[in-house]
Image (cartoon, coloured by chain):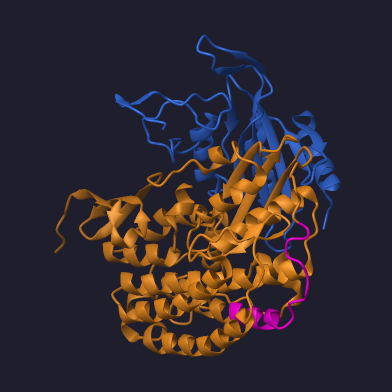
Chain colours: A orange, B blue
Amino acid sequence: MSLKTEELVLNMGPQHPSTHGVLRLELLVDGEIVKNVTPHLGYLHRCFEKHTEAMQYFQVVPYTDRLDYLASMGNNFGYVLTIEKLLNLKVPERVEYIRVIVAELQRIASHLVAIGTFGIDVGAFTPFLFCFRDREIILNLLEELTGARFLYNFMAVGGLNYDLPDGWTEKVKDFAKQFRNTIKELNDLLSFNKIFIERTANVGILPADLAINYGISGPMLRASGVKYDIRKNAPYSIYDRFDFEIPVGKGLKGTVGDTWDRYFVRVLEMEQSLNIVEQAIDNIPEGDVKEAIPKKIKPPVGTVYGRVENPRGELGFFVVSDGGVNPFRVKVRPPSFCNLSVINEICKNNLVSDVVAILGSIDIVLGEVDR
Amino acid sequence: MKTLNEFFDLLKNQFGEAVIELKQDIDPYIIVSADIMDKLVEFIKVNDDFKFDFCTCVSGVDDANGTKSKDENGNDVITGGTLSVFYHFRRLFDDAKLIFRVQVPRENPKVKSIANIYRAADWHEREAYDMFGIIFENHPYLRRILMPYDWEGHPLRKDYQNPEFYQGIKISYN
């Protein structure tokens, strides 16, 4: 016997712990089955793009920190690379190496938050503490380097604002050594936990063609089985010098592109980031990190699109210059914004509790969605 | 892999006058007419020479190339001129890129929507509508996305004036 029920509109958020910020999802539910999801964004809109038009090029860098605030180094990196492309500026080797190292450390830290909070979303509290314990080490390392734990303002157009402190590389090596154990622990505790697999495998399947059509990038695209990573497919900076793998979703516990795949790709990626850090840390050349920083940035007239592989996917900056000292227009292509747009397709006909798991696996940062 | 010039010639053959110019820049782009955008995008998605499967970004730009004047309160007003939309496309297997630009009159900015061809463009077009007031025709759900739904004006236009009131509440700019 089936009972006919009326459809109900249910608001999830804006103040809801599992929306990872201020996001409102308008769910149309039939009983416990979700029929339609309408996201409402903009609660964290801070006019980043309008701000940039009133500032000089180098003044924009601290604002980029606040886009994806869990991966500030990546945002800095994306912005300065774009402006360097606009200026056709070469940066010293030492700068390139340090940039790659901090970006990869940041990727690990960011994935640790993603994994930890995802565990909380589906009811596993302990892995969160393990993740944050190790993230703390990375934050301490970056604090020693920049003086800030979150919003670093570390990179400058043409160089870096600070050089490495003494003994920093040794600390990074120690961290790399012990962090492999954490990954092992994490796998025992969460990845192959039966309850966790039951909760995530075969839930919210995102097929590859749909992912590409929606412009999904980063770990979420790779979880759907598409081997595309900007660091490998179009290497920027010095990523072509390192030996690392691009993990893709294989449907180990369910179907390719399910929530478990999206989670596990991140775990594998942390290991690869660690490989890059270990290869780079011993080869940092000597040099001056501030030598190529231009005194005044006045680029030629033109348009440029620069991009980096941020922890959440392709972070792009589209910059239009009118020849002045302020950018004429800066458009950010935030990975979370594009990744979130697919939520209706993958939440349809799932349970309400699965929406929480799916949203956690998309791993959005609202600072970047709303800008 | 074909060069951008070859891509341009192929598109010129297909669409004739509507494909206007190949503009050299740091990232060179092709200027096309606004009313063929949907057909053109459909073409580059399915045609064997193109097969651009990934829509990276759609960005609105205020060209601010009209006549600038001041109104009675001393605020900048731009009349005439154009707004632009930049489209960035990619092909995932060889990472080739293709960039288009359309220019539409500021007073009547209308572009054919590509949101039904590339779903990725959906939210980007809504953002361009929100920030610049560019109307994307045939868009499935053209509504503000980042600003409040009842906001007036389009903030990223160069002659945008900060409102004095929002819903009857005075806004402080200090």
Viewer can see residue B146: yes
Residue A18 falls inside the magenta stretch: no
In front: B41, or A272?
Answer: A272
- Outermost residue on the front side: it is A166
Report whether A151 appears left or right of A300: left
The image quadrant that residue A152 belongs to is bottom right
Is the residue A99 above or below the residue A315 in the image?
below
Q: Does residue A255 appear in this view? A: no
Q: Quadrant of residue B75?
A: top right
In the rendered image, the vertical position of residue A41 relative to residue B68, given as above or below? below
Residue A280 within the magenta-colored segment of the rendering: yes
Report the residue at 77% width, 47% height from top: B27
Tell me: residue B47, above or below residue A140.
Answer: above
Region rendered in magenta: A273-292
Q: Please provide percent x and percent y for residue B25.
A: 80, 42
Residue A370 rendering spot, x and y as whole percentages: 45, 47
User: Residue A46 location, x and y as percent?
Assistant: 45, 43
Q: Which picture quadrant has residue B41? A: top right
Q: In what quadrant of the picture does the N terminus of chain A appear?
A: bottom left
B97 relative position to B172: left or right: right
Q: Position of residue A330 (x, y in %)?
A: 62, 42
The residue shown at (83%, 54%) is: B2
